[in-house]
Image (spheres, rainbow, N blue to C red):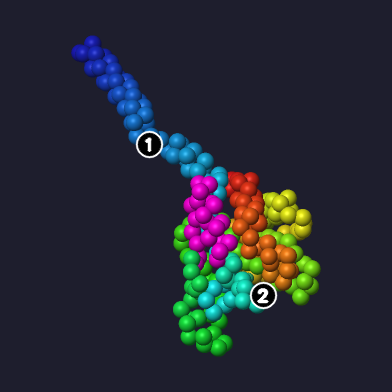
Amino acid sequence: MKIIWIKLKTLRFAWYVFLIIITFYLSLILNYFFQISPSSKNISTSSLHSKIVTIGIDPGHGGIDSGTHYQRLYEKDLNLILSLKLAEMLCSQGYRVVLTRETDCLLTPYAHYKYKGHPYKSDDLQQRLIKLEAAKVDIIISIHLNWSEFRFRRGPIVFYSENSLLSQKIAQEIQDQFNQVQPYRKLTHSGDYYLLNHATLPIVLIELGYLSNQDERYLLQREAYQKKLLQAIINGLKKISLD
Ligand SMILES: [Zn+2]
């Protein structure tokens, strides 16, 4: 009786060992074919997010809001031209791009009524942020042009959000690139702008130059100078790691 009991015990033990070995090899096979291991998933996700992949471009102003202007040269129009070119260059270099506008418009329905006193401007800016945040972009670049009563002032300036260290870092990298490709060296600034204050994503606002300066106004409309500035933005972005 005792011998039978011991044999049964041995058999049960052998059966457990057999089950453990089978489970182990099955999990190895499943991992190999379906990559179901949670650790391998984590590795691929973190490496995917270490670089900027999707860029939100916001061409400043539009519609009834022209921004600054020199005679019939309106900031809103040049902002759009420069933004579309930046989008094209980014796409050809492997980035995904989302634009807040691709035509001469505002994103708020209130602008059509031209209702005096209605805060259409803040509603428009809020809509821009909603659009880019819904698209889950990695970073927002808002494109603008500057104006000063001091006509000698010139050179591109990058503004960052005080709420985000990454925004400050991106601004610095892009400003460094601008300072290398044109002689008017500038510092980055934190800016009290609606977009910078309200964005929940890393954001920079770029004033690409002064429409009030005659030489810069001329250059900003020239293809070669535009491409030089826009490539400087892309080169700055390439130096950023999101980790
Ligand atoms: Zn502007």
Residue named by callout 1: 36
Q: Is 8 on the left-hand or right-hand side of 206? A: left
| Residue 88 forms part of the magenta stretch | yes
Q: Nearer the viewer, residue 221 or 51?
A: 221
On-image quarter of the C terminus: top right
Say whether residue 30 is visible: yes
Graded by Cα atoms within 10 Å as few (under 14), some (14 to 19) or many (20 or more), the crowding at tag 1 reads: few
In this view, the residue in front, 13 or 207, is: 207
Q: Residue placed farthest to the top in the image?
A: 3
Question: Label 2: how many residues lie within 10 Å, few (<14), some (14-19) or many (20+)?
Answer: few
Please determine whether, in this image, residue 66 is positioned above or below residue 178.
Answer: below
Magenta span of residues: 80-101
First in sequence: mark 2 or mark 1? 1
The residue depicted at 23 percent of the width and 11 percent of the height is 3
Q: Give the residue type at disc 1.
A: Ile
Task: Say which of marks 2 and 1 sits in front.
Answer: 2
Q: Amino acid at mark 2?
A: Tyr
